[in-house]
């Protein structure tokens, strides 16, 4: 009887954690549905801007190949992880120390993936709708597309 309260509280805590995890995952999946738009970007990194928020930043690219000339749409909640205008693009995502100016990048929006090839690394990452207000403000303040 003495431990019954703790057991009930523990079960309630686990139930709440599972509910919050599932509802957050569902919202993330719904938001990333916007990325199924056929965008493919290939380019060379010309500039890197890093924020102080978990390595989030902006990769500026000179486009080598893109299947669209312009992409700059707004969402109700969050922002797309890329913008394209003419022969330049920006990609918004966590940027790790291995990234350098001159690296080659290929983003495939439908697969929500980005491939890197550079002097220090050859790997891949994921792209997703940016919803963190700190990251959104960083993009607004540091984008070349004002």
Image: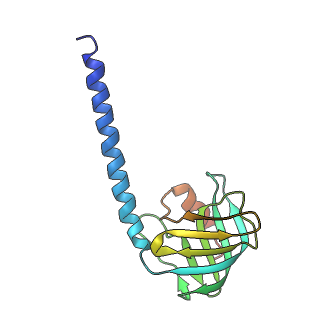
For this orientation, the residue located farthest to the left is 1
The C terminus - image quarter: bottom right
Q: Quadrant of residue 138?
A: bottom right
Residue in front for this viewpoint, 125 or 143: 125
Say if 50 sits above or below 64 in the image.
above
Q: Is residue 120 visible?
A: yes
Q: Position of residue 45 (x, y in %)?
A: 71, 74
Q: Position of residue 66 (x, y in %)?
A: 57, 85
Residue drawn at the location 33% of the way across and 57% of the way down: 26
Total marks placed: 0
Say if 95 sits above or below 104 in the image.
above
Q: Position of residue 140 (x, y in %)?
A: 59, 67
Left or right: residue 99 versus residue 54 is right
Say if 133 sits above or below 117 in the image.
above
Left or right: residue 38 versus residue 1 is right
The N terminus - image quarter: top left
For this orientation, the residue located farthest to the front is 122
Q: Position of residue 35 (x, y in %)?
A: 44, 72
Residue in front for this viewpoint, 138 or 107: 107
What colouring does the structure picture have? Answer: rainbow
Q: Is residue 74 visible?
A: no
Residue drawn at the location 60% of the way across and 84% of the way down: 85
Residue drawn at the location 32% of the way across and 32% of the way down: 13
Residue drawn at the location 35% of the way across and 39% of the way down: 17
Residue in front for this viewpoint, 100 or 20: 100
């Amino acid at each position: 009887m003495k431990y019954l309260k703790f057991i009930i509280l523990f079960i309630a805590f686990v139930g709440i954690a599972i509910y919050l995890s599932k509802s957050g995952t569902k919202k993330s999946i719904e938001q990333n549905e916007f990325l199924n738009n056929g965008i493919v970007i290939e380019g060379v990194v010309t500039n890197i801007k890093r924020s102080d928020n978990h390595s989030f930043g902006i990769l500026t690219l000179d486009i080598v190949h893109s299947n669209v000339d312009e992409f700059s749409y707004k969402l109700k909640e969050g922002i797309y992880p890329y913008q394209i205008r003419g022969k330049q693009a920006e990609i918004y995502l966590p940027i790790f120390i291995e990234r350098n100016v001159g690296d080659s990048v290929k983003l495939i929006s439908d697969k929500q993936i980005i491939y890197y090839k550079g002097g220090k690394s050859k790997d891949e990452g994921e792209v997703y709708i940016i919803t963190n207000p700190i990251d959104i403000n960083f993009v607004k303040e540091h984008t070349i597309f004002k």
